[in-house]
Image (spheres, grey):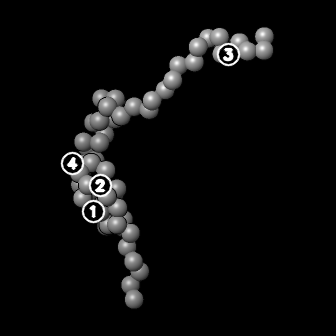
Amino acid sequence: MPPRVLTVTCPTCGASVRWEPASAFRPFCSERCKTIDLGAWASESFRVPASEDSPDSEESGV
């Protein structure tokens, strides 16, 4: 029985991608989807939310 191959979802288009060495752009399905994702990061479309602390909270205990 051959080993089972993991299948993941392309983060850009949602297509199924086999997670194996033959899938050169994994986790993306193609170079196009990989480039779209890179462009989104470069244009800062993906951001991690941050909360700004007030200056008073750093001075506690002083």
* SS under mark 4: helix
Q: Which mark is residue 16?
A: 1
User: On the image, numbered disc 3 is attached to which residue?
Assistant: 58
Q: Amino acid at mark 4?
A: Arg
Residue at the location (34% across, 29% down)?
44
Q: Quadrant of residue 47?
A: top left
The N terminus lies in quadrant = bottom left
Tag nearer the camera, 2 or 4: 2
Sequence-first disc among 4 and 1: 1
Q: Which mark is residue 32?
A: 4
Location of residue 29 with respect to 38 vertically, above or below:
below
- The amino acid pointed to by label 3 is Glu
Looking at the rendered structure, the secondary structure element under dot 1 is: strand
Q: Amino acid at mark 2?
A: Cys
Name the spot of residue 19 as percent of width and height, x first: 36, 65
Nearer the camera: disc 1 or disc 3:
3
Residue reaching furthest to the left:
32
Residue 19 visible in the current orientation: yes
Q: Confirm or deny contact between disc 1 and disc 3 (CB under 8 A).
A: no
Locate residue 6: give its quadrant.
bottom left
Q: Position of residue 48 (x, y in %)?
A: 44, 32
